[in-house]
Amino acid sequence: MQQRRAAPGKPNPVADAASKAIGNLRADDDMLAVLNAQASLNPMAIEKLDVPTARQQPTVADGVNVVLRQQGRSTRLEDLVLGVSSMDTMIDGAAGKLPARVYTPTGAGPFPVVVYFHGGG
C-alpha cells in the first residue's frame, strides 16, 4: 500500500480527484491520516463491483475509526458526541423489519425529529 503525504503544492490523489469537482482543495494532515487509514483497509473501486460487494467496502468512516484507535480514543458515538445517546432498534417495514438507530440529546425535550431514509438497491 502506498502512503500518501501532505506536501505544499503536491496534491493527494483522492483530494485532487475531488478538487476537480469542487475547487482547489488539498487534504490537511488530519484528513490525510483518515484517507491513509482507509487506504490501508484495501478498498476496491465500488464502480467495478456488484452492489452487495460494494456495500461491504471500507468507507471513510472506517478510516476515522482506525485513526481514533491509533490515537487510543474511543470509537463509540456516545464518547465522540457528548450529550447524545444512541439506541439500535428494529421497526416494521413493508417487507419486514428494518434496522433503525435513534439518537437522543440529553435534556427534558421536547425534541425535533429528523428521519433519514436510505434507498435499497
Image (tube, grey):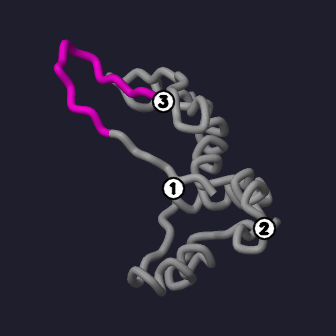
Q: What label sits on residue 49 in the rendered view?
A: 2
At 52% across and 53% down in the image, what residue appears? Answer: 119
The answer to which quarter of the image holds residue 112 is: top left
N-term-proximal mark, 1 vs 3: 1
Q: Is residue 106 shown left or right of residue 92?
A: left
Residue 69: x %, y % from top left: 65, 35
Residue 105 shown in magenta: yes
Q: What label sits on residue 30 in the rendered view?
A: 1
Against 32, is 84 above or below? above
Say which element carries label 3.
Answer: strand
At 22% across and 15% down in the image, what residue appears? Answer: 107
Q: Mark 3 points at which residue?
A: 101
Gap in angstroms between the C-alphas marked 2 and 1: 29 Å
User: Which range of residues does the magenta coloring cover?
Assistant: 101-114
Residue 87: x %, y % from top left: 48, 21
- Can the viewer see residue 102? yes
The type of residue carrying mark 1 is Asp
